[in-house]
Image (cartoon, rainbow, N blue to C red):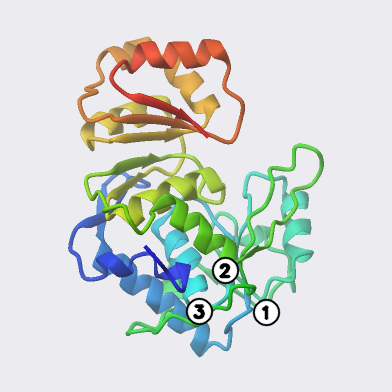
Amino acid sequence: MALDNPGAIFARHRDSDRTAVVDLTSTTPREVSYAELAARCEAVARGLQRAGFGPGTRVGIVAGNRIGFYEVFFGAMLAGAVALPFNIRLTDAALAGLIASNDVDIVFADAANEGRVPAGAAQRVVVFGTAYEAFQDPGPFTPAAVPDDAPLLQPFTSGTTGLPKGMLLSARAVRWAMRQMMPATRAPDPTVRVSVAHPLYHQNAMLGSKGAFLNGGRVVMMERFDPERFIAAIGEWAITKVHTVPTMMARIMARPDLLARLDQRSIREVHMGSAPVSQRLFVDIRAAFPKAYVRIS
């Protein structure tokens, strides 16, 4: 699938009433359709355009897992802007320094992290909630033309050898990555259901989300990882791809009582990435999920 603007990731399923995201970040699950999510991404792009933040604008995201994270992430790219998802698990000083040093033009923050954005670090700070809804400009939006060498995304390293470092990715690089996930010769599989309980500012979680969206499948998103709730969601929402990092799987393996009650019929793949996997952990996972393909990337 070719996407001239990677922010148009929902284009193929733009008018579908199929569920794109099951939002489990509150006590009441909320299902968001492809049509609704696509429209809200476009509303963010239109809002950026209306506010004077056009192509090349640097859009920071300082928030936990929420539907609005996807809307800003893809909406920024639709507008030809650069999305910068910041790690909110950094210390206040480290996060403030990172925001201040990356020339952010506008920041979208949740209420829990609004106060961690340094004064004057951006022209505007929009807080998810009433202000965010007012910022959006609903209506059709034609994705911005994005040249191959234009910057489009800046994720950050984990900072294990110092402060996190920004990795500025061009439109060409983002398009290439999406083609690897969904080659033009592969038919989409809308039955894909991916679990996302790790933070969306991390590329591992966003990679799993993109894979589901490109297939027209569904993401089951939690605010944070909790082994009991995560394992319960696998069975309740018929997850086909258990998307994790090794530390998450190690905590799951430590709960054989929960695994014993898990309905595994839907699971096709257990995916781990972003860190080394020990031989012992790999063997334990293979034994716990005997019918699933265990993938390490």
Q: Is residue 58 left or right of residue 279?
A: right
Q: Name the residue type under label 3.
A: Ala
Q: Along the polypeptide, which appears first: circle 1 or circle 3? A: 3
Q: Compared with residue 203, is residue 122 higher up or lower down, i.e. above or below?
A: below
Residue at the image point whose x is 35% and y is 30% from the top: 269
The Cα atoms of the two marked residues, 1 and 3, are separated by 17 Å
Residue bearing mark 2:
171
The Cα atoms of the two marked residues, 2 and 1, are separated by 25 Å
Q: Is residue 183 visible?
A: yes
Residue at the image point whose x is 42% and y is 54% from the top: 66
Q: Is residue 125 left or right of residue 68?
A: right
Please state which of the two labelled residues, at mark 2 or mark 1, is closer to the viewer.
2
Residue bearing mark 1:
123
Find residue 119 and report its horizontal and vertical position in percent: 73, 70
Q: Name the residue type under label 1.
A: Gln
Cβ atoms at labels 3 and 2 below 8 Å apart: no
Of residues 129 and 188, the one drawn nearer to the viewer in this rendering: 188
Of residues 75 and 275, the one drawn nearer to the viewer in this rendering: 275
Residue 171 lies in quadrant? bottom right
Q: Name the residue type under label 2.
A: Ala
Residue bearing mark 3:
79
State the SS at label 2.
helix
Quadrant holding the N terminus: bottom left
Residue at the image point whose x is 76% and y is 50% from the top: 94
Please state which of the two labelled residues, at mark 3 or mark 2, is closer to the viewer.
2
State the SS at label 3.
loop
Q: Along the polypeptide, which appears first: circle 2 or circle 1? A: 1
Q: Is residue 135 visible?
A: no
Q: Compared with residue 87, is residue 280 higher up or lower down, i.e. above or below?
A: above
Q: Is residue 163 left or right of residue 274?
A: right
Q: Is residue 215 left or right of residue 43?
A: left
